[in-house]
Amino acid sequence: MKFSLQIQTGAGSKSRSRSLFQIPKNPAKGPARTVMILALWMTLASCSLAVVRPQQDMSDTSAAIKAAREVNAETLSPDLYRQANEAFFRARNEYRLKNFDLAKSYAAKARGFAERAEFESMQSGAQRMSTATPDAPPPPPPEPYAYPAPVGTPANPALQGTPSAPSTTQTPGSPSAGPSVPGGAPGTGGTPNPGGPSSP
């Protein structure tokens, strides 16, 4: 889309066309615009990337409070244990609100209180008790499923007189040492194959 721009001067008139969406090219604005975009990008990046989350401090504080609990610090030194829990509660809230400096300072205070509570409890003669649950004994092995005997007649009439499942009982004086197998070779406890090894 083009439009005409009429500029009238005293000497005469000039006509020039320009696009509505064309940005005038000014070489002086190019580098300034680039510098401004880079500065804006660096500012945004520094706000989110330069902040280090105090994850290790929070983890250390949680471990210190757990260690104090293992020596019954809540009963032997309740004031210090309560202060440790309150400071850790504040640290977690500040961490959720992304106030990492405050979270780190509260976590350091909580860890100090928890370590002092643990130390005082140990001086009072407390024994460390594990808060871990004991392992449960393994379950007994499952009992094997007793499959029911098949019902019906065999599809092959030659197998009509043989049992449908192999027998595991042996009669005294039987020459075989293993279970009776239908269609087995003579002397192995099975019935001989009437048609020989190649017949169906």
Image (tube, rainbow, N blue to C red):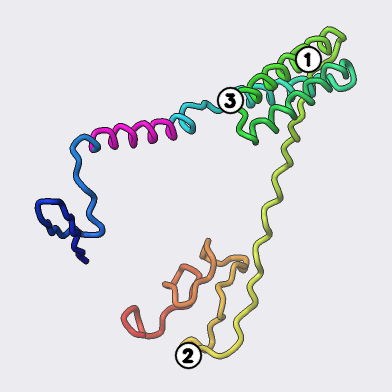
Discs 3, 1 touching: Cβ within 8 Å: no
* Residue 156, x across and y down, in percent: 45, 90
* 34 drawn magenta: yes
Determine the CA span between mark 2 and mark 3. 76 Å
- Magenta span main SS: helix
Nearer to us in this view, 84 or 104:
104
Residue furthest right in the image? 75
Residue 191 percent location from the top left of the image: 48, 77
* Kind of residue indicated by mark 1: Glu
Hey, what amino acid is under mark 3?
A: Pro
Identify the residue under disc 1: 118
For marks 2 and 1, give the one nearer the viewer.
Answer: 1
- The Cα atoms of the two marked residues, 3 and 1, are separated by 23 Å
Q: Quadrant of the C terminus?
A: bottom left
- Furthest residue in direction front, as rendered: 10
Q: Nearer the viewer, mark 2 or mark 3?
A: 3
CA separation in Å, label 2 and label 1: 79 Å
Magenta highlight range: 30-45
Is disc 3 surrounded by few (<14), some (14 to 19) or many (20+) residues within 10 Å?
some
Q: Amino acid at mark 2?
A: Ala
Q: Would you identify the image quadrant in which residue 28 lies?
A: top left
Quadrant in which the N terminus appears: bottom left
Residue 155: give its label.
Answer: 2
Q: Earlier in the sequence, mark 2 or mark 3?
A: 3
Residue in the image at 48% along x and 90% along y: 155
Looking at the rendered structure, which numbered label has been put on residue 54?
Answer: 3
